[in-house]
Image (cartoon, rainbow, N blue to C red):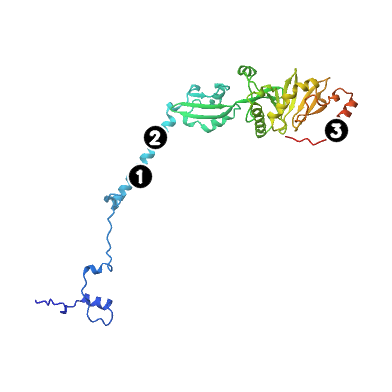
């Protein structure tokens, strides 16, 4: 068969070519569809590539009906085996005698110095002979912290058959007067009992605090003990340990800390207010000898006011209460502790006492400024 190779020779038509020309060539195009190379279709034809074939996680035999049944049976058997193993392990730990608290010797106690071992073991009396995993640890810790001397407690299991109890005891910072008894109190206002013999053996050196009552809420007692610590720290901030001179501290009035100090075989009451404790103690320290010479019956010193103090005299007959008072300046203009008039109210007759006291207040009527 002869084929014409000339470029302008007519080419045989085919059904596919005729369809393309009818659908895509514009009307009136008579020259026919020119030949195009394969590179000419680069921007027109998009070739869809097939991605890699992913195989399933399950083996091929699970795709059949009986394969799926067999696979499900194997999974259920494995789960049952795991559950049975867990139950066996639990039964072992719960019933094996090696995990039983046989005696009090299996309970270790750490951190107790005031509390005895028996006092701590009393919390675990019901746990002797019990499996170690059945002991309610949180409840035992709470019961331990209900003991007044215990500030914090922890309870740990030591396998196979031991318990370790660690406590942090409270630290007393003052004596407290409760009725006719002397007890101890810590920073949070918790009142602590201790036998007199143990107090003597520990050689505590604290002032006696009043105004801390067991019937008061713990929050109120804690606030007053914070004021007490502020007072003591202020006095001892100079390094002289001035708090050792105090015999009693009254915290009944939070706005007026009152302290009792021994002076010339008697007690002297000092009013400090609620601020500037060290500065006010210095005023008392520097003027005490002159006050004692001028006022032998001095009973109390009120240091709460600026540039002056109020001296109160004791009743000579009973030593209780104050019969008279005298103001003295403490500022730069004061000439010294002996510059004020003597406290004649303490020596005068009852009628003269009232007149003298009235005269003192009328001649020095000015505003007292608190520090």
Numbered label attached to residue 363: 3
Numbered label attached to residue 230: none
| Residue 279 visible from this viewpoint | yes
Q: Between residues 350 and 54, which one lies in front from this camera angle?
A: 350
| Residue 136 visible from this viewpoint | no
Q: Residues within 10 Å of mark 3 (few under 14, many from 20)?
A: few
Circle 1 residue: 76
Q: Position of residue 352 (x, y in %)?
A: 90, 26
Pick whichever of labels 3 and 1 is earlier in the sequence.
1
Q: Give the residue displayed 41% in from the left and 31% down from the top.
A: 92
Question: Under tag 2, what secondary structure?
Answer: helix
Q: Position of residue 86 (x, y in %)?
A: 39, 37
Q: Give the residue displayed 88% in from the left and 26% down from the top.
A: 353
Q: CA distance from mark 3 to mark 1?
A: 104 Å
Answer whether labels 2 and 3 touch (C-beta < 8 Å).
Answer: no
Circle 2 residue: 88
Query: Which marked residue is nearer to the observer: mark 2 or mark 3?
Result: 3
């Amino acid at each position: 068969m002869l084929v014409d190779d000339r470029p302008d020779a007519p080419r045989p038509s085919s059904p596919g070519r005729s369809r393309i020309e009818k659908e895509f060539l514009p009307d009136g195009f008579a020259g026919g569809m020119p030949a195009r190379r394969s590179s000419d279709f680069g921007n027109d034809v998009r070739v869809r590539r097939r991605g890699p074939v992913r195989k399933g996680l399950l083996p091929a035999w699970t795709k059949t009906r009986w394969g799926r049944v067999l696979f499900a049976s194997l999974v259920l058997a494995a789960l049952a085996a795991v559950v049975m193993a867990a139950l066996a392990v639990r039964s072992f730990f719960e019933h094996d005698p090696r995990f039983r608290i046989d005696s009090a010797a299996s309970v270790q106690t750490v951190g107790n110095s005031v509390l005895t071992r028996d006092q701590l073991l009393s919390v675990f009396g019901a746990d002797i002979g019990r499996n170690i995993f059945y002991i309610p640890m949180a409840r035992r810790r709470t019961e331990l912290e209900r003991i007044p001397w215990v500030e914090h407690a922890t309870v740990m299991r030591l396998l196979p058959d031991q318990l370790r109890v660690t406590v942090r005891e409270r630290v007393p910072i003052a004596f407290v007067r409760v009725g006719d008894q002397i007890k101890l109190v810590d920073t949070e206002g918790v009142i602590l009992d201790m036998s007199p013999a143990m107090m003597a053996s520990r050689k505590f050196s604290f002032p006696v605090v009043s105004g801390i009552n067991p019937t008061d809420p713990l929050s109120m007692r804690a606030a007053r003990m914070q004021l007490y610590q502020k007072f003591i720290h202020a006095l001892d901030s100079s390094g002289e340990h001035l708090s050792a001179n105090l015999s009693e501290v009254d915290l009944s009035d939070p706005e007026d800390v009152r302290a009792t100090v021994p002076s010339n075989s008697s007690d002297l009451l000092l009013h400090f207010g609620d601020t500037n404790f060290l500065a006010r103690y210095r005023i008392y320290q520097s003027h005490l000898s002159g006050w004692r010479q001028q006022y032998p019956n001095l009973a109390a010193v009120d240091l709460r006011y600026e540039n002056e103090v109020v001296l109160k005299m004791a009743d000579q007959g009973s030593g209780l209460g104050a019969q008279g008072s005298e103001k003295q300046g403490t500022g730069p203009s004061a000439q010294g502790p002996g510059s004020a008039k003597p406290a004649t109210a303490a020596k005068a007759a009852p009628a003269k006492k009232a007149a003298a006291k009235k005269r003192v207040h009328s001649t020095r009527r000015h505003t007292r400024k608190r520090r």
